[in-house]
Amino acid sequence: MAEEVKETKKRTVKTISVDDRITNAELIIKGIRNNPEMKSAIGKYGIGDTELVNALLILERTIESVNAQKKEYSEQYKAVEEFNSAKGELDTLYMKDVKIARIAFENDSEKETLLNLKGSRNRAYSSWISELRTFYDNALGNSEVTETLSEFGLTDEKLKGRRTLVDNVSEKRITAEKEKAEAVAATDARDARIAELEDFVSDLKLLAKVAFKGNNEWFSKLGM
């Protein structure tokens, strides 16, 4: 079977899951903002309502980027699966057609060259798809070839159908590669948002340790 498109593996930001990072950040930011005493205590260290509201916006954008990344990967998985399935089915048909053509033109070197029947089949996608185009285009463009193949059950209608499948597979390949690129871009965007959120949360934790010093109950509520 011809070379398959590989799905892009998801990249993780660190060992802790993305969802856990979002949950932890949300607990700390909302926990402080929704508690007047905590908010007042940390306000003395430059973290007021404006900073906390901005943090909530960063959190919201991060959640949106995480959801967008999951969506892009879902679309990528679907596109790659559809491409590989269509390519596999077409390759099976093509190999059968090549076997028929080799029998039909066993003693005809001109037709063997025209249809590229000699040698092993290419497995790399670019060579493989080119090989299929050559076979079906040249077969359909030569009346002697189509008449002979028809006698073996490979009719003109079947050849045209196969050629349409070649174009369909090519389009699915383009779509799969496009979805792969979008999935990678979505991951980069997600990682950037998470980094921005964690930068703020990291500073917030450091200030909270000073502002809430000795108040273990508050630390517990914030998951610290």
Image: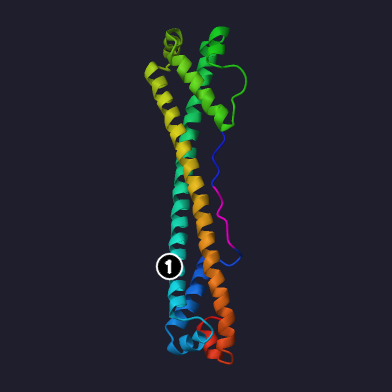
Percent x, y for residue 161?
39, 24
Percent x, y for residue 100?
50, 17
Tell me: 199 left or right of 60: right
Identify which residue, 45 or 26, lies in the foreground: 45
Q: Is the magenta stretch mostly helix, strand or loop?
A: loop
Percent x, y for residue 137?
46, 18
Residue furthest bottom as drawn: 214
Q: Is residue 95 among the parts visible in the rendering?
A: no
Identify which residue, 197 or 88, lies in the foreground: 197
Q: Name the residue under label 1.
A: 60
Q: Residue at x 55, y 87 (%)?
A: 211
Q: What residue type is labelled 1?
A: Glu
Percent x, y for residue 133?
49, 22
Q: Residue at x 43, y 18 (%)?
A: 154
Q: Give the range drawn in magenta.
A: 8-13
Q: Residue at x 44, y 77 (%)?
A: 50
